[in-house]
Amino acid sequence: MATEIFKKFKFDAAHSLPQAPEGHKCRRVHGHTFEVAIHVTGEVNPDSGWIIDFADIKKAFGPLLEQFDHYYINDIEGLEQPTCENLCKWIWDRLAPQLPGLCKIVVMENETCGAIYTG
């Protein structure tokens, strides 16, 4: 039976949504404290007692976190329209090769709004 684990990260960053309708507040540059949760599923290894070491998730996400934290996300290649939905997919595409069992990426731009991507 598979078990699902997750590790959360937070970062502060600015973005704008240039494709939003004219006059929409999100077209302007603004910032958020984003939260990203990376979910991995698999069988618990009977020797280690875990699916994957949380440190391995941190190591895989670390370089991406460095690109985001206190930067303007629109400047990152592939994130010219950095909605939560697009951030989820962008992160997934970079983590999936490194994290066997990756099953879900959750990106929240505040405590009430976010997106979930399951590949």
Image: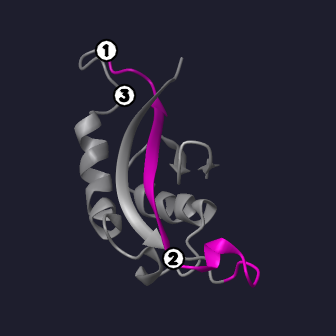
Query: Upstream in the sequence, badge 2 or badge 3?
Result: 3
Q: Amino acid at mark 3?
A: Ile
Using the numbered discs, state the Cα–Cα distance from disc 2 to disc 3 in whole angstroms.
Answer: 31 Å
Secondary structure at badge 2 equals loop
Residue placed at 63% from the left, 79% from the top? 27
Write down the residue under mark 3.
51
Query: Upstream in the sequence, badge 3 or badge 1?
Result: 1
Q: Amino acid at mark 2?
A: Leu
Q: Give the magenta-colored segment's residue range.
A: 19-45
Residue 1 found in image quarter:
top right
12 relative to 25 in the view: left or right: left
Residue 52 coordinates in the image, percent (x, y): 32, 33
Write down the residue under mark 1.
46
Q: Residues within 10 Å of mark 1 (few under 14, many from 20)?
A: few
Residue sitting nearer the eye, 48 or 88: 88
Mark 2 or 3, closer to the camera: 2
Residue placed at 52% from the left, 48% from the top? 105
59 relative to 89 in the view: left or right: left
Residue sitting nearer the eye, 10 or 78: 10
What is the number of the mark on residue 63? none
Residue 46 found in image quarter:
top left
Using the numbered discs, state the Cα–Cα distance from disc 2 to disc 1 in whole angstroms.
Answer: 40 Å
Write down the residue under mark 2.
79
Residue 24 coordinates in the image, percent (x, y): 71, 75
Q: Is residue 1 above or below residue 89?
A: above
Q: Amino acid at mark 1?
A: Pro
Residue 63 coordinates in the image, percent (x, y): 27, 63
